[in-house]
Image (spheres, rainbow, N blue to C red):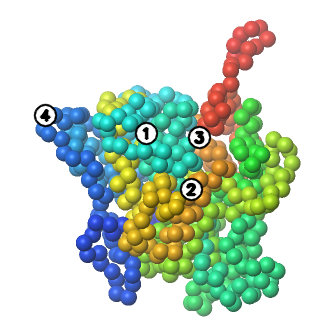
Amino acid sequence: MNARQWMVALGTLLASGLGIPAVAQGLDTPSRPAGSDAVMVRPGDVVPPRVAGPCVPGRCPFEGQRVRVLTIDSQPIGAPLIELKGEYEAATGARLEIVQRPIGELFTTLMADLTGGGGRYDACIAGAWWLGELVEGHYLLPYDAYYGDPRFPAWDIEQVLPAPRALLQYGGRRYMVANDHDGQVMHYRRDLLADPQHRAAFQKAYGHPLGVPATWDEFREVAEYFNGKDLNGDGEPDHGVVLPLVGGAQGMFHYMSLSAPFVIGPSNPQLYWFDPRTMKPLIASPGHVRALTLMASLVKYGPKEMLRWDLGRGWDHFLAGRAALAVTWGDLAALAQQPGSRVRGKVGVAQLPGTREYYDIGLGRWVRTTASNRVGNTTGGSWAGVISRFSKAPEATYYLLALMASQSKSEVYAARGWDGIDPGRRFHFLPPNGTARLESYVNAGWDAADVRDFLQAYHDTYSNPLQLPYLRIPGAYSYWLALDLHLAEATSGQLGPEAALKAAAVDFEDITIRLGRERQRDAYRVSLGQGRLAPRASSKGNVR
């Protein structure tokens, strides 16, 4: 799950009659609605298997200790912790307290405790972009000493695919215990792209076959073609794409993922956000400008209201069969499986499109590619547990997070969909990519074709050697919000793409100056795996 207002989306979808997908594994007689092959499962009907047996009273490893975990106050995100509370307490003798806060208050609540040194919270289910702030502030305890110790539940970090695995570590040490694995993918209407009439009409209009877009230019053509056509049989015109762009929500996330192949490529795998030598912003480069130009052009192929829509409204539009394409997280494909959805069995999912050329910032020129230049991403929160340096029970805390990360639990979390935990480990994927069984997903209510596409898209995204650099430095969200403000100016037509990004670059520079250039530069380099620069000496021989 990520900072994408899941609770808003969930409420919207439930209000429109859509159910919540959950894995049916372990049910003796799963119920099925008349005339449907979808399994109807509600939250609470299915829980993951027990991993840890109860301890012997008087010999419990953490008898009398208390672990307090801070998490988001939404039922989907908090559900796994609530589910394993009894199992954890019986296995350890410790007492688990789950403290929930609104998503907008979670980071500030945690930071108030950490900066005060109070140690009220032993752990937090944190967003991955917090890691730079937390580690650079010396607020977190790495778990390297506990990982692999037989006293704790076993989980394998090597099962996590390369891209999301990188988010669990910072500066060569492990801080986040694997849980959720976020990234954005392309959703498309498989039935529309396969329709003979649409294929013939598209070929005539564009001079090449209609297919799953491999480049953003092709994506724009498909969006243009389907815009204004009736896509769900209700006699009303529908839209080529849905891309929620309300300010202060997810617009900057959509831009990051979309823009990656315009900037990142084989000769430029990292120069995207800042120059790591000077911390000068790169957000106004020609590649970024072309990407934002493309993004702004897509607006006319979606509902005009989407400039004011959050994710819930956008997802609902797609689930009603009213859009041909969507760029978002995998939750949409999971929600599409439920009775009430008009697109179950019709939802194709693929890695995001690429480009035929990208702007290499280091070379200062455009570089052509023979194949589509696709770039993976881990856009989103990838919510996972971290341990406070001030915890009075760090081992008991790690035991809890490791229990939640264990394979048999994670398999259920990823398959059932409603808890917002997205796939990212080898055992989540079907052969030959992994060891999951198709039956587990089909029994959870998934259409077989939909889930095959869904899992392949995430495997391709996370195993791609080219990845959008994830911003994990102090003030990361301040940079993102500044970007979001100026993206809204471009997508609404208030500013041109180049002017909007130049304004964002000015704001980036102001934030960097306020937080300290050398501090930001060093944190940025560490987040990229480059290491800190040695302090520079002044002309008088003093180190500065």
* Residue drawn at 65 percent across, 45 percent down: 469
Q: Are marks 2 and 4 in contact (CB under 8 Å)?
A: no
Q: Which mark is residue 386?
A: 1
Image quarter for residue 292?
bottom right
Query: Residue 349 appears at what percent x and percent y?
Result: 58, 69
Q: What residue type is labelled 2?
A: Gly
* Residue drawn at 60 percent across, 91 percent down: 235
Q: Residues within 10 Å of mark 3 (few under 14, many from 20)?
A: many
Q: Is 115 above or below relative to 130?
A: above
CA distance separating discs 2 and 3: 15 Å
Query: Residue 428 appears at what percent x and percent y?
Result: 45, 58
What residue is pinned by disc 4? 58
Q: Residue furthest top?
A: 540
Q: Do the residues labelled 1 and 2 touch (CB within 8 Å)?
A: no
CA distance separating discs 1 and 2: 20 Å
Sequence-earlier tag: 3 or 4: 4
CA distance separating discs 3 and 1: 15 Å
Depth-wise, is mark 3 or mark 4 nearer the camera? 4
Depth order, front residue of 87/493: 87
Sequence-earlier tag: 1 or 4: 4
Please give left or right for residue 57 compared with residue 412 in the image: left
Sequence-earlier tag: 2 or 4: 4
What residue is pinned by disc 2? 183
* Residue drawn at 43 percent across, 45 percent down: 156
Q: Do the residues labelled 1 and 4 touch (CB within 8 Å)?
A: no
Q: Residues within 10 Å of mark 2 (few under 14, many from 20)?
A: many
Q: Residue 472 carries which label?
A: 3
Depth-wise, is mark 1 or mark 4 nearer the camera? 4
Sequence-earlier tag: 2 or 3: 2
Depth order, front residue of 159/34: 159
